[in-house]
Structures are given as C-alpha cells and as structure tokens.
Image (cartoon, rainbow, N blue to C red):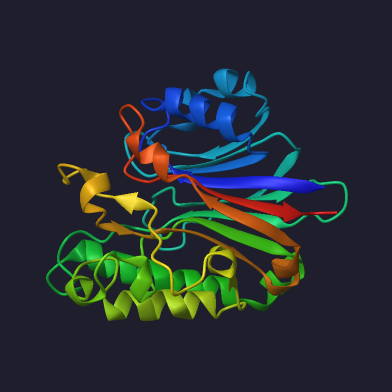
Amino acid sequence: MILRLATWNINSVRLRLPLVKQFVAAYRPDVLCLQETKCPNELFPHGELAELGLAYVETHGEKGYNGVAVLSRVPIARVMAEDLDASGHTRHLAVRLEAPAIQPVLHNFYVPAGGDIPDPEANPKFRQKLDYLQAMRRWLERPEMADNGPMILTGDLNVAPLETDVWSHKQMLKVVSHTPIEVDHLTAVQESRPWVDVVRRFIPPEEKLYTWWSYRARDWRASDRGRRLDHIWTSPELEERTKGIEVVKDARGWEKPSDHVPVILDIDLG
C-alpha cells in the first residue's frame, strides 16, 4: 500500500478551506496533517472535509491560535495530544495510521515561531521556542517511545536547519528560524530517535529548498527569499519504504494563500 501523506501549515483552516479543497482534489493525499488551524475542535469543518474523502479526522485546536489536525482516508486512532511546555497551547497531535500492514504512529507538531528577536533574555517568545524544542527532545527520548514501533514526525517545526534551507545562510544567521542555537536544538530533537529527514533523502542537501515565503515580499516568486520550515521525518525502519517527495511551491501563488506550502511524502506501508 503506497500511502500519500501531506503536511501543511494552513494558517486558518476555515479561512482557507477552499485551498484545502483545491489541494486535495489536485494531489489526492491519503493523510493530511494541518498546523495553525486556528479553530476550536467544535467548529472544525468535519462535514466539508468528509465530502472530499477525508472521513477520519482528529483535531487538537483552540480559538484563534495554533492548532493541529490530522485528516485521513484510512482509519486513524488518536494516540495522544501533548502539551510539552505546559503553555496550554495546542501544538501536538499523534494518531496511529491503521493501514493493512504497517501501522506507524504519526506525530503532527507546530513548534512556536519565536518572534523576531533571537535573544531568549529579551524575547519571551524566543525563550518559549527554545524551551519547547528542549521539551520535545526530552519527551521523544523517553524509553517508552521506542515501544510505539515505527513513527513519522511531521509539521511546521519553524527551523530551517541547513544552509540550503534558507535563501542566504550568511544573512540569516541572526534571523529567527536559522540561528545556530535553534539549529542546534532541532538537531538534538532529530538525534533523539534518531530521525531520518526523508525530504532531504530525495532532494539533495546541496539543493536549495523552501516551504515558506513571507507575506512581506512584494513578489515572493521573483525575490524567492524562502525558508524550509516544514519537515517530514521517519524513524529509521521506515526510511527505505519512502518512495518520493514533492513540495507544492505553486500553492504559494494560489488565491489568498498560506505563507507555507504543502509537502508530500509517498510511503509504502505494505
């Protein structure tokens, strides 16, 4: 069974529901992980998404901020939704994909953005981001996590770790999302399993790759000052089962777009 999994920071699922419909119709994901849904659970548009074939839905949301959701054509079972930094924010949701053979646990994360000033003493939002990444690493390192079997971790991790994940490594070193301390923290999270960055398995690390372009750009495509903030990782036993990756750059040019674009993984679950 080749399963198509997509991740997308939608920046308000109700506001951009037409874009979700457009994406699902064009790319036919079996599982769609959304971040920054900005929607409490009771107002999530279950019915309209079920009409697209995404009949299985799990949400973890709040009014106006944050929020994550997993929509699926295959049955899913909710596993957990963790408040890793005790902030009360809805930033994590895990489900088990009930595929016929391999049934990995899928973790969907929305890591704090961190504000504009890369100084944890001067900027509480940046301190929160670093604390969250540290808590995420500790949580994933727990021995009981190994008992979950194969896992996939995806979402808007709000860090562009490689030099080729930003438009200018030199100019971005002091910009939140690519500072050395953030990269170190995300690397520690990745090494907690260790996790495989399967996007870079198919798109070489030497190649520039972005999934986010600022709303501030007058012409985002012409300037192309992007960052790769959206990631898909797998536990090592799933690496060889990954079959392909696609970053849907054109979605940044759709009407009333999110500033992020979908990232798609095709994976063989037997």
Residue at (26, 53) in percent of width and height: 224
- Please identify the quadrant where the C terminus is shown: bottom right
Q: Position of residue 30 (x, y in %)?
A: 68, 39
Residue at (38, 81) in percent of width and height: 184
Q: Quadrant of residue 254?
A: top left
Q: Position of residue 226 (x, y in %)?
A: 29, 56
As drawn, which residue projects farthest toward the front? 222
**In the image, is 248 to the left or to the right of 54?**
left
Residue at (37, 67) in percent of width and height: 165
**In the image, is 148 to the left or to the right of 168?**
right
Q: Is residue 100 visible?
A: yes
Q: Relative to the observer, which residue lies in front, 166 or 116?
A: 166
In the image, is residue 211 above or below residue 39?
Answer: below
Residue at (41, 25) in percent of width and height: 14
Number of marks drawn: 0
Q: Relative to the observer, which residue lies in front, 32 or 163?
A: 163
Q: Is residue 10 visible?
A: no
**In the image, is 104 to the left or to the right of 219?**
right
As drawn, which residue projects farthest toward the left? 122
**In the image, is 190 to the left or to the right of 183?**
right
Q: Relative to the observer, which residue lies in front, 36 or 232?
A: 232
Q: Position of residue 137 (x, y in %)?
A: 50, 74
Q: Quadrant of residue 73?
A: top right
In the image, is residue 256 above or below residue 248?
Answer: above
Q: Relative to the observer, which residue lies in front, 267 or 79?
A: 267
Q: Position of residue 197 (x, y in %)?
A: 56, 69
